[in-house]
Image (cartoon, rainbow, N blue to C red):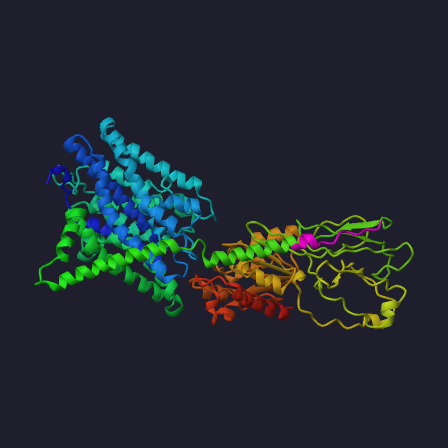
C-alpha cells in the first residue's frame, strides 16, 4: 500500500471521545431531563473532525509536497455514504408502512441528505430543530451537512495555509476564523426566537471544526502521527482532566432555550473540547486512560452509525408506541432499535467497505451468494439479505412517492386559521352602519377592538340628579347600534366580535382606562325584564333600550348600554329599587376573549361554532410566560371582555405565583378560565398542577378540564397526540363551555 494511502496511527482515546459525544446526543434526544446540554455532543464531533482532517491533509502535504483533493473527497464519500444510503432506504420504507405523518417532507429531506445541504434546506423551509411537536426523521443530518461543507472548502484553505503562511501564523488565522464564526452566532441570535438558524448554519456553527483545525496546526507532531518527533506537553496532564470535567459540566448546564448557550456558551464548550482532544491523542495521562476503556472504544467505532440511526428510531418509536407504552418506554425501544441498526450497519456495510472498498465488498457478497454446498447457512443468509434489500428498496420508493405534503397537525392548524379568517369576512359583511341624530349634543366614540369598525352612539343629555334613562320628548331621540367585527391576524390567528358601549354622558369623550372595566352582562344576553309596571312606564324610566338585528342572525342583540348615574334612584317607588337580580346567564361569544396557543388555534372552528362572536387570539408556539405581554397588548386595545379564557401550557410550564402576578394586570372582578394542557410533554403534569393552584388562588377563576375531556379519546388527536382534529375540537369547546357556564 502506498504511504500516502496508509492511515495514520490509531489513537484509541479518540474513539472514547466519540463515544462520549454520541451517548450524550442519544440521551438528549431520548428526553433525559438531567442532560439538557447533551446536544453539545455534536460539537465534540466537530472538534475531532476538524483536527483529524487537518492533520491528515497536513501530513500528506509534508510527505509529498501536495494534497490530492479528489482522493481526499473519495475517501470521505467511501466512509460516509454507504451507511447513510442504508439509513435512507430504511427510513423511506418505514414511512411507507407506518404512516402516522412520518413521511411529511420526506422528499426535500432526502434531497438535503444526498446533497449534504440539510441544514440550509431546513432553514429555508422553516423547519425547527427544537420543534418537539412535528420532528422530521432526518433533522439530525444537519451536522453531517455542516461537516461535508467544511470538507468541500477546507482542503483548499489548508493548501493555502501550508504554502504561504508560517506555522504560528496559521494557528492565529484559523483562530480568527473561529472567532468570527462564534461572533456571527452571537450577533444573529435573538432571545426568544427559534435558534435553528444560528445553531445549524455552517457560518455560525463552524467554530468547532476550526478550533479542531487550529489544534492540528499547533500540534503537528502528536501521538496521532508517531512517525514524527513527539513533543511532550506536561501541562496536558492537568489540562486534559480539567477540560473533560468542563465538557461534562457543560452538557448539564447548556440548553437550547438559554441565551448564554449562543452568546459564548457553545464556543467555550468547544474550547474545552479542544483540551479533551489534545489529552486524548497523547499516549499517556488520565484522559487517555479513561477514554481508552474497551466498551467506550467499541461505542466510539460505531458512533457514526449510532448517530445516523438513533434519531429516526426514537421518532418512529415515539409516534407508534407512545400511547401504549408512554414516552419513556417508547424512547427505550427506539434506542434499542437504533443499537440493532447500528450493529447491522457496522458489521455488513461500514467495516467491509472500509477494509475492501465498495467493489471488494460487493465481490465478497457475490462469493457468499454462490457459496459451496458445504456452507448452506451462509448462502441462505446471503440470499435472504439480498431479497430483503430488494424489497426494502421497492418499499422505500413507495414511501417517497406517497409521502404527504402536509401533516395532520398542519391541516388542523390551517382549518383553525381559515375558520377565523372566514369569521372576519362574514362579520365585515354583516356589520350594521352607525345611526346618529344630529340634534343630540352629546356624542361619544364606542370603545371596542382597536382594529374593529367603531360605532358612534348619540345620547341626549342626562338631567342632573335624575334617573339613568332620559325622559322622552319630541327633541330627545336615542340612536344606538350594535357593532360586530372580526379580525384575523396572520400570525396570531385572531377573530374578534365586539359590542359598542357608550361612555358616561357629560360632553367630551373620556380617556380609555388602563384596565378595561368588566362588562356586567353579556351583550348577547337579553336585558332583565322590569320588576313592575311603574318601573317600566314611570315618567323617569325613559324608553326601552333600542335593539338591532344583525343581518343573517335573525336574533335581536342588545344595543349599546348607557351607563347609570352612580347616585340616583328611580322615583317609581321601592318596587323598582327592590327588583331582584336576574339569574346568571351562560356567557355568549360576544362576552368572551380567548387567548391561547396552537391547541386553541386547532380548536377555533369548534369555538366559533359554540360561541358565535368569540374573540380568539391564538398563536403557534405561544408560551405561558408570554401571557404578560399579550395581556398588555389587549389592555391597550381595550378589548378584553367579561370572560377571559386562557389556553396555554402546551409549550411549557410556569410557577403558579408568576401566573397570578401576571393576572394582576386584570381587574379583580375579571372572570378567568384556565384550560388544562394535554400531551406527551414532560411538563404536562406540572403545568396542570400550576394552573390548578393559580385557579384556587384567585377569585372568579376556574379550570376547563381539557386534559380530562380528551384523555380517553386520543384517537381524536393528530399524529402528535397534542392537537385536536375536528371532533377533538368539539371536546375542547365543550370543556370551555362547561367552565364558562359555572365560573362567576
The residue drawn where x is 22% and y is 38% is: 72
Q: In screen coordinates, is 239 left or right of 641?
A: left
Extreme residue toward the top, this view = 164
Q: Is residue 257 left or right of residue 532?
A: left
Residue 82 picture location, percent across and down: 24, 49
Q: Quick one: quadrant of the N terminus? A: top left
In the image, the segment drawn in magenta is: 426-437
Q: How many marks?
A: 0
Q: Residue 499: percent from the left, percent from the top?
A: 71, 57
Q: Nearer the viewer, residue 124 or 249?
A: 124
Q: Quadrant of the C terminus?
A: bottom right
Q: Is residue 427 magenta?
A: yes
- Image position, residue 524 (x, y; %): 71, 63
Find out whether residue 263 is within the magenta segment. no
Does residue 199 sit above or below 677 in this rendering?
above
Q: Say which of 186 and 132 sits in front.
A: 132
Amino acid at each position: 500500500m502506498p504511504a500516502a494511502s496508509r492511515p495514520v496511527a490509531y489513537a484509541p482515546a479518540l474513539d472514547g471521545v466519540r463515544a462520549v459525544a454520541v451517548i450524550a446526543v442519544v440521551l438528549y434526544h431520548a428526553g433525559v431531563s438531567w442532560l439538557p446540554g447533551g446536544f453539545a455532543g455534536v460539537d465534540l464531533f466537530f472538534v475531532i473532525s476538524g483536527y483529524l482532517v487537518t492533520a491528515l491533509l497536513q501530513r500528506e502535504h509534508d510527505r509529498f509536497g501536495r494534497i490530492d483533493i479528489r482522493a481526499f473527497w473519495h475517501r470521505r464519500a467511501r466512509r460516509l455514504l454507504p451507511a447513510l444510503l442504508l439509513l435512507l432506504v430504511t427510513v423511506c420504507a418505514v414511512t411507507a408502512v407506518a404512516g402516522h405523518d412520518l413521511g411529511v417532507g420526506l422528499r426535500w429531506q432526502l434531497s438535503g441528505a444526498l446533497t449534504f445541504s440539510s441544514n440550509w434546506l431546513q432553514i429555508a423551509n422553516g423547519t425547527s430543530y427544537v420543534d418537539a411537536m412535528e420532528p422530521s426523521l432526518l433533522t439530525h443530518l444537519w451536522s453531517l451537512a455542516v461537516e461535508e461543507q467544511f470538507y468541500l472548502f477546507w482542503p483548499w484553505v489548508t493548501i493555502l495555509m501550508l504554502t504561504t503562511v508560517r506555522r504560528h501564523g496559521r494557528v492565529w488565522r484559523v483562530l480568527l476564523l473561529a472567532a468570527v464564526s462564534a461572533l456571527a452566532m452571537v450577533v444573529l441570535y435573538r432571545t426568544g426566537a427559534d435558534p435553528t438558524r444560528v445553531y445549524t448554519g455552517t457560518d455560525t456553527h463552524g467554530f468547532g471544526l476550526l478550533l479542531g483545525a487550529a489544534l492540528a496546526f499547533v500540534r503537528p507532531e502528536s501521538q496521532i502521527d508517531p512517525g514524527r518527533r513527539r513533543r511532550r506537553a506536561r501541562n496536558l496532564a492537568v489540562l486534559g482532566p480539567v477540560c473533560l470535567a468542563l465538557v461534562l459540566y457543560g452538557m448539564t448546564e447548556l440548553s437550547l432555550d438559554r441565551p448564554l448557550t449562543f452568546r459564548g456558551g457553545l464556543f467555550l464548550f468547544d474550547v474545552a473540547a479542544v483540551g479533551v482532544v489534545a489529552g486524548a491523542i497523547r499516549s499517556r495521562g488520565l484522559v487517555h486512560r479513561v477514554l481508552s476503556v474497551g466498551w467506550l472504544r467499541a461505542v466510539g467505532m460505531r458512533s457514526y452509525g449510532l448517530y445516523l440511526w438513533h434519531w429516526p428510531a426514537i421518532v418512529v418509536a415515539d409516534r407508534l408506541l407512545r400511547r401504549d407504552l408512554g414516552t419513556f418506554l417508547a424512547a427505550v425501544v427506539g434506542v434499542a432499535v437504533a443499537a440493532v441498526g447500528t450493529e447491522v450497519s457496522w458489521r455488513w456495510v461500514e467495516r467491509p467497505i472500509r477494509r475492501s472498498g465498495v467493489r471488494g465488498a460487493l465481490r465478497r457478497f457475490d462469493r457468499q451468494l454462490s457459496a459451496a454446498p458445504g456452507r448452506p447457512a451462509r448462502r441462505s443468509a446471503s440470499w435472504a439479505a439480498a431479497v430483503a434489500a430488494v424489497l426494502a428498496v421497492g418499499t422505500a420508493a413507495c414511501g417517497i412517492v406517497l409521502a404527504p405534503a402536509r401533516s395532520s397537525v398542519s391541516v388542523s392548524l390551517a382549518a383553525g386559521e381559515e375558520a377565523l379568517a372566514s369569521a372576519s369576512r362574514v362579520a365585515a359583511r354583516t356589520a350594521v352602519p352607525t345611526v346618529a341624530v344630529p340634534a343630540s349634543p352629546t356624542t361619544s366614540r364606542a370603545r371596542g377592538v382597536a382594529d374593529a369598525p367603531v360605532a358612534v352612539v348619540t345620547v341626549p343629555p342626562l338631567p342632573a340628579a335624575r334617573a339613568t334613562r332620559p325622559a322622552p320628548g319630541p327633541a330627545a331621540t336615542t340612536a344606538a347600534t350594535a357593532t360586530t367585527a372580526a379580525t384575523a391576524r396572520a400570525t396570531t390567528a385572531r377573530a374578534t366580535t365586539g359590542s359598542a358601549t357608550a361612555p358616561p354622558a357629560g360632553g367630551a369623550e373620556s380617556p380609555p382606562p388602563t384596565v378595561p372595566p368588566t362588562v356586567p352582562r353579556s351583550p348577547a344576553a337579553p336585558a332583565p325584564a322590569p320588576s313592575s309596571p311603574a318601573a317600566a312606564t314611570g315618567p323617569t324610566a325613559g324608553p326601552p333600550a333600542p335593539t338591532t338585528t344583525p343581518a343573517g342572525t335573525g336574533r335581536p342583540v342588545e344595543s349599546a348600554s348607557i351607563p347609570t348615574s352612580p347616585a340616583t334612584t328611580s322615583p317609581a317607588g321601592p318596587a323598582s329599587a327592590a327588583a331582584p337580580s336576574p339569574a346568571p346567564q351562560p356567557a355568549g361569544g360576544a362576552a368572551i376573549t380567548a387567548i391561547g396557543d396552537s391547541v386553541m388555534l386547532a380548536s377555533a372552528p369548534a369555538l366559533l361554532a359554540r360561541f358565535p362572536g368569540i374573540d380568539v387570539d391564538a398563536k403557534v408556539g405561544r408560551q405561558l410566560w408570554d401571557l404578560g405581554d399579550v395581556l398588555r397588548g389587549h389592555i391597550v386595545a381595550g378589548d378584553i371582555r367579561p370572560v377571559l379564557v386562557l389556553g396555554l401550557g402546551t409549550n411549557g410550564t410556569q410557577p403558579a405565583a408568576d401566573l397570578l402576578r401576571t393576572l394582576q394586570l386584570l381587574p379583580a372582578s375579571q372572570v378567568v378560565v384556565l384550560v388544562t394542557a394535554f400531551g406527551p410533554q414532560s411538563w404536562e403534569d406540572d403545568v396542570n398542577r400550576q394552573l390548578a393552584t393559580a385557579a384556587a388562588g384567585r377569585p372568579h377563576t376556574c379550570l376547563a378540564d381539557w386534559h380530562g375531556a380528551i384523555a380517553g379519546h386520543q384517537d381524536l388527536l393528530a399524529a402528535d397526540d397534542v392537537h385536536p382534529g375536528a371532533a377533538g375540537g368539539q371536546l375542547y369547546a365543550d370543556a370551555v363551555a362547561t367552565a364558562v357556564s359555572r365560573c362567576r
